[in-house]
Image (cartoon, helix red, strand yellow):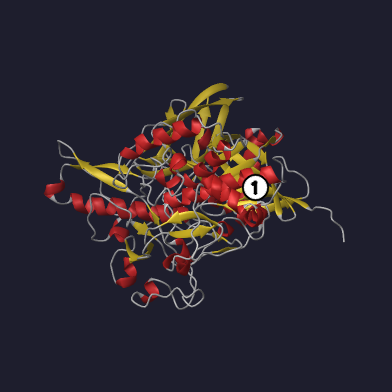
């Protein structure tokens, strides 16, 4: 039989994988011809003003868009300049969506100013799906530089992906076909003529939450050249100041590393997260790790069952960078690298009989008799503050169907949304937006009472904090019994002692609200361990995983899923990457032949029964 390697390049666009035997640059071939004109991508605006750059849904909708996240107050204009080579009449199109359609005025409305003229059209009002909304025509009197501004009207999550100026009144524009959309954007932006820059590293970590930061710091401590790719501008994931969840779990033997990136035990949603963010950013900046914040992984290359390289787009420029390494660590939470590479994975809840994970006291709320796709949900944290004056809050009829009669002036971890018919990855934008409606509606209900006249919204996260989605499968699948029976493993690399803690939506027990959850706690009675065999893929020879996408059952995830514990997984994989290089070994071979050395690096003491 032939020993020739079969190299496959995979570019992911809109959740669709395009494969090639040749290393792709930007050109993948448009399905049809689309109109030429002037394209302005919102992510490339010179100033975002008060708008937020939202990168969370790039794979689902084909862009990184600007979000008018003003908590009910219109945000400052986002502005940029564009070169117009020819004067004359231009027809204006904006890629946007009505994120909350219904029998009310659309909440996400905004206008567009081009030069000194503000268009009459209100954008964000026509279609629930991402689409090109017509904005009418404008006369540009002379060629040259002209300013464009996004003018928010509501402060309630208006969103813009791109603006297109065309000489044609009815241009041909890609919308539903995200592959064509990406290629067309690359063409009009000039990226199509660029070569993809390539770099070599000892290890590439994708995902810059606590797990990815822990992995990168541990690998760098051992002298490796490390690339850390993160789709947000900040590091920390759910612990970041964008999400503001405090880090739970223990450090185990990894305090030296984790104390540099963790948080205080502040109230979830607290502005104290900003101080911890500064500490974490300083640690990462001084670490010697090659940091690629604001880069979205968008593809990979494989040699048979090994990953050869990973691609990532700069979220503002759209420029693609290719990262080569002998070993990769998936710390994306959603298991993107493993998923793209064809690794085995699980989603949803197993039958309680599969791994003997039943808890009779709570029945189906804990673990179902029949497997389903229900998972722990995503939270959007928020709070308000009392000020020294009366503060009005707009009417939000569009939020009432979700909030119903619920009243609140702050949220906590249990403001959580999961639905058996929604996917935490594919439907992430809808899930986050559902929480927006819950928050604004509940706050509006509270503001109806005179006693709350001086309450003002202080913080609402625009990045949802996920708990569970894909779980990649390793040589060992971690289950409830491993924690509850405190099983000993010869290849233990992570230690935890917190209760097994899973959530269910209160709606399942008759509550009116579908956005609140309840936690169930199963006591373990002491320390339990996670084996290294659960931290590398059984299918992809040079892929490790750290964080909530590690190899486990749904209930197996419920104990060690918190951030300090996940960061311990990161540390273990980072040290393992160093041993892979030192011994010319795969992660599996490190686990089989060099586990004692890995445990010494981590500092974990293996108990024997």
Residue 526, quarter of the rendered image: bottom left
Q: Position of residue 500 (x, y in %)?
A: 39, 63
Residue 551, quarter of the rendered image: bottom right
Closer to the camera in the image, 66 or 353: 353
Q: Position of residue 409 (x, y in %)?
A: 23, 49
Closer to the camera in the image, 149 or 262: 262
Q: Which residue is mark 1?
A: 299
Horizontally, is 16 left or right of 248 in the view?
Answer: right
Q: Residue at x 19, y 49 (%)?
A: 447
Q: Residue furthest left?
A: 450
Closer to the camera in the image, 587 or 519: 587
Q: Position of residue 397 (x, y in %)?
A: 29, 54
Horizontally, is 130 left or right of 412 in the view?
Answer: right
Q: Residue furthest right?
A: 1
Is residue 257 at all visible to an observer of this figure? yes
Mark 1: few/some/many CA within 10 Å (<14, 14-19, 20+): many
Closer to the camera in the image, 549 or 178: 549
Q: Position of residue 549 (x, y in %)?
A: 52, 56
Quadrant (top left/top right/bottom left/bottom right) for the N terminus: bottom right
Residue 71, quarter of the rendered image: top left
């Amino acid at each position: 039989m032939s020993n020739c390697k079969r190299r496959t390049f995979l570019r992911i666009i809109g959740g669709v994988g395009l494969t090639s035997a040749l290393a792709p640059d930007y050109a993948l071939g448009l399905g049809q011809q689309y109109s030429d004109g002037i394209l302005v991508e919102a992510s490339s605006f010179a100033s975002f003003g008060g708008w937020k750059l939202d990168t969370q849904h790039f794979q689902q909708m084909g862009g990184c868009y600007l979000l008018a996240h003003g908590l009910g107050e219109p945000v400052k204009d986002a502005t940029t300049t564009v070169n117009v080579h020819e004067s004359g009449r231009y027809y204006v199109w904006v890629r946007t969506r009505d994120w909350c359609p219904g029998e009310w005025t659309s909440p996400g409305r905004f206008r567009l100013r081009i030069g000194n003229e503000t268009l009459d059209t209100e954008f964000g009002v026509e279609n629930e799906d991402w689409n090109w909304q017509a904005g009418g025509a404008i006369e540009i009197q002379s060629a040259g530089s002209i300013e464009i501004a996004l003018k928010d009207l509501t402060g309630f999550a208006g969103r813009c992906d791109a603006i297109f100026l065309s000489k044609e009144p009815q241009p041909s524009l890609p919308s539903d076909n995200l592959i064509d959309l990406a290629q067309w954007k690359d063409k009009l932006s000039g990226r199509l003529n660029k070569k993809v820059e390539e770099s070599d590293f000892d290890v590439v970590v994708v995902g810059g939450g606590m797990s990815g930061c822990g992995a990168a710091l541990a690998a760098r401590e051992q002298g490796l050249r490390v690339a850390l790719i993160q789709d947000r501008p900040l590091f920390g994931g759910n612990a970041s100041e964008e999400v503001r969840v405090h880090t739970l779990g223990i450090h185990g033997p990894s305090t030296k590393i984790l104390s540099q990136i963790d948080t205080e035990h502040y109230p979830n949603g607290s502005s104290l997260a900003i101080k911890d963010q500064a500490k974490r950013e300083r640690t990462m900046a001084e670490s010697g790790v090659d940091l690629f914040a604001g880069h979205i992984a968008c593809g990979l290359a494989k040699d048979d069952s090994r990953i050869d390289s990973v691609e990532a787009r700069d979220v503002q420029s759209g420029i693609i960078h290719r990262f080569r390494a002998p070993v990769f660590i998936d710390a994306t939470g959603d298991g993107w690298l493993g998923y793209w590479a064809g690794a085995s994975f699980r989603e949803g809840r197993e039958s309680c009989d599969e791994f003997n994970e039943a808890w009779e006291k709570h029945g189906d709320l804990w673990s179902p008799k029949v497997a389903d796709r229900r998972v722990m949900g995503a939270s959007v944290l928020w709070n308000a503050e009392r000020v020294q004056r009366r503060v009005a809050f707009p009417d939000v009829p569009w939020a009432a169907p979700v909030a119903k009669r619920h009243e609140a002036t702050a949220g906590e971890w249990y403001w959580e949304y999961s639905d058996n018919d929604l996917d935490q990855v594919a439907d992430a934008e809808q899930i986050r937006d559902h929480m927006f409606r819950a928050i604004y509606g509940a706050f509006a209900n509270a503001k109806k009472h005179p006693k709350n006249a001086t309450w003002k919204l202080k913080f609402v996260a625009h990045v949802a904090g996920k708990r569970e989605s894909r779980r990649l499968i390793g040589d060992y699948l971690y289950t409830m019994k491993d924690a509850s029976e405190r099983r000993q493993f010869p290849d233990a690399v992570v230690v935890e002692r917190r209760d097994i803690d899973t959530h269910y939506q209160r709606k399942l027990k008759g509550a009116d609200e579908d956005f609140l959850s309840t936690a169930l706690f199963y006591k373990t009675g002491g320390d339990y361990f996670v084996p290294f065999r659960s931290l590398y893929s059984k299918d992809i020879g040079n892929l490790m995983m750290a964080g909530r996408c590690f190899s486990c059952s749904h209930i197996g995830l419920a104990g060690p899923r918190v951030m300090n514990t996940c960061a311990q997984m990161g540390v273990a994989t980072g040290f393992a990457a160093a041993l892979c290089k030192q011994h010319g070994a795969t992660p599996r071979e490190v686990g089989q032949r060099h586990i004692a050395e890995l445990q010494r690096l981590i500092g974990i003491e293996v108990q024997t029964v």
